[in-house]
Image (tube, rainbow, N blue to C red):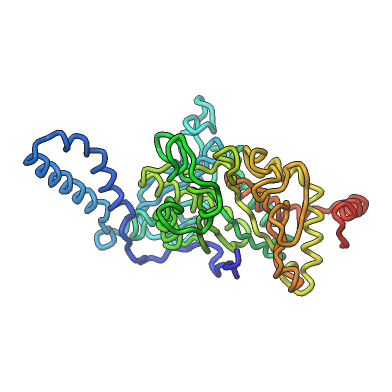
Amino acid sequence: MAQILAPSSQWQMRIAKNSAPACPMTAKMWSSLVLKQNKKGIAKSSAKFRVFALKSENSTINRMEDLLNLDLTPYTDKFIAEYIWIGGSGIDLRSKSRTISKPIEHPSELPKWNYDGSSTGQAPGEDSEVILYPQAIFKDPFRGGNNILVMCDTYTPQGEPIPTNKRHRAAEIFSNKKVIDEVPWFGIEQEYTLLQTNVKWPLGWPVGGYPGPQGPYYCGAGADKSFGRDISDAHYKACMYAGINISGTNGEVMPGQWEYQVGPSVGIDAGDHIWISRYILERITEQAGVVLSLDPKPIEGDWNGAGCHTNYSTKTMREEGGFEAIKKAILNLSLRHKEHISAYGEGNERRLTGKHETASIDTFSWGVANRGCSIRVGRETEKQGKGYLEDRRPASNMDPYIVTSLLAETTILYEPTLEAEALAAQKLSMNV
């Protein structure tokens, strides 16, 4: 996270009335996929027909690309809004499109919408209507033009947040005056694994077999070390276009695994930006014919898992003498270790084993420059006496609304007893 220096000045993405048009990302990938699907049929035909068929297919593909690339701005003020929400599993993303008749600059100007919650595991069939509340806007890198992506949260028709709506509670915490005054920054490192479609085995791995041991793949280059770079690069650019505060990307320790970083983002923006970045990644892997996995331990054995390390700081931590505030925050985190672990992602016990750059799930620990701890503090932070901490416990499938708001709640709002604080400080060998 060294490249993350300061948050974007825009905490809430706004849409310009005359955004520059962009080509949808589907064109070349679509062509490649259609040709692959039809390759068998072409090979069986005669030479003359093969040439004719290829021309016909290319013509069809080109016409499809022309339609996908249509710039509507010279002809109408109307545009397409893709409403996006979190489904019933708490990790799946759903979306649907609607036409908006006039330019907008803020989510509050967009209409609420509804969907069938019984089809997403979020409502019973006899009372299935769930209402979408638009909350954040991003430019659409797939449709380009003035089209937008809209992050929504979910409510009953009576206006109550449904159980899977974790954004509502997070927004309440980030609206607390104590939290606002501390201006919490988050830098989130999202790891993910790319899988081959039919076999659900990592990209670049021999089917049913294993590549060479870990070592050459982390930040590596070459056809035998890097698998899926085009997907990572396409995602990077699409996020920048959309207005997501993405700050970097790299190949990870396990082959077929990648990471990107988002932040620093302030408060609720961190969750919005991670969820939309995940949606964009799902769409890109969909086009590429590759499966995206956020499983925290996709391959058992001597292979790294996938996490979502969360870098965090408050205004007090970033000011002179902030290292004392960092140590106090670590103390509070140690007292609520179980609460955090229970909220940090499904299947995390398979990842947090004390091996492969993780701490044990059962024991809280902290250290300077130690990647085998629950909480890591950087050398530069120790040297300067101010900065940030890194919570290494969250799994790759964590909900960023939960993790970020829980960090703020524990370190800013939670007030342990003096006795509990003293015992925790003694246990952690920490002078606070």
Q: In the figure, residue 187 lies in which quadrant?
A: bottom right
Would residue 134 be seen by someone viewing this image from the given angle?
Answer: no
Q: Say which quadrant the N terminus sits in.
A: bottom right
Q: Which residue lies most toward the front here? A: 212
Residue visible at 56% across and 41% down in the picture: 295
Left or right relative to 362: residue 72? left
Left or right relative to 123: residue 337? right
Residue 54: x and y, percent?
15, 44
Residue visible at 32% across and 63% down in the picture: 21
Q: Which residue lies most toward the right here? A: 419
Residue 288: x and y, percent?
36, 47
Q: Nearer the viewer, residue 357 or 194?
A: 357
Q: Say which quadrant the C terminus sits in.
A: bottom right
Q: Is residue 278 above or below residue 163?
A: below
Residue 8: x and y, percent?
55, 68
Q: Nearer the viewer, residue 220 or 396?
A: 220
Q: Is residue 87 above or below residue 215?
A: above
Q: In the figure, residue 162 lies in which quadrant?
A: top right
Left or right relative to 274: residue 288? left
Q: Is residue 243 above or below residue 300?
A: below
